[in-house]
Amino acid sequence: MKTESKVLSSFLAAAVWADGEYDEFEKEFVNEVGDVLEIKTLLADLEKTIKETEKMNEDQLASFLETAAKKVDAEEKEGVLTLCLQLMCADAFLAIEEVENFLAFADILGIDEDKATAILDEFVAEEEDLIIEE
């Protein structure tokens, strides 16, 4: 992956805050992603970024993500967005707030809403055990 671990962890931290909880499912997912992408520091970078962002208000977090988005490799933007969605669903539950955050991440990454919705729809269709908040 061309995008730096610290930049990726910015979006992953925001995905963690989408439901306000950093749990074992999310830690396990990040460990697996770090192994697959061969990013040994991903979990440590994420935990550091979680601490940096936990006191940020919504505007500060948006600004933080806008700065990070400029450093995401153009070819990897959809992949970063998909990783955020996977992390938000690591607990097999997708809340309305998480969908709203997913669409906000897409906007910040410069991914149009139709493409983001297609990514979301495809993910939901593939995840058999996913519980979606009505």
Image (cartoon, rainbow, N blue to C red):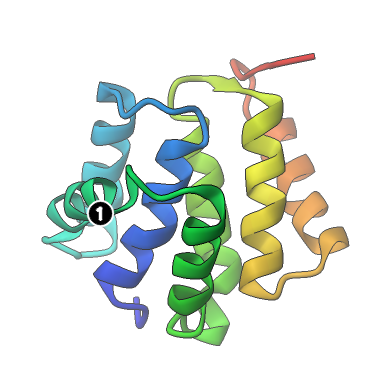
Judged left or right of residue 109, residue 116 is right
The residue sitting at 36% across, 65% down in the picture is 8
Q: Where's residue 29, x and y in %?
A: 32, 37
Judged left or right of residue 81, residue 68 is left
Q: Is residue 111 above or below residue 15?
A: below
Q: Quadrant of the N terminus?
A: bottom left
The residue sitting at 80% across, 62% down in the picture is 115
The residue sitting at 47% across, 44% down in the picture is 15
- State the residue in front, 16 or 30: 16
Q: Is residue 7 above or below residue 127?
A: below
The residue sitting at 24% across, 34% down in the picture is 27
Q: Is residue 49 above or below residue 68?
A: above
Disc 1 marks which amino acid? Glu
Q: Where's residue 72, x and y in %?
A: 46, 79
Judged left or right of residue 32, residue 88 is right
Q: Is residue 94 visible?
A: yes
Query: Badge 1, how many Cα within 10 Å: few under 14, some, many 20+?
Result: few
Q: Quadrant of residue 93?
A: top right
Residue matched to label 1? 52
Q: Is residue 112 above or below residue 30?
A: below
Q: Where's residue 85, x and y in %?
A: 56, 44
Q: Quadrant of residue 101?
A: top right
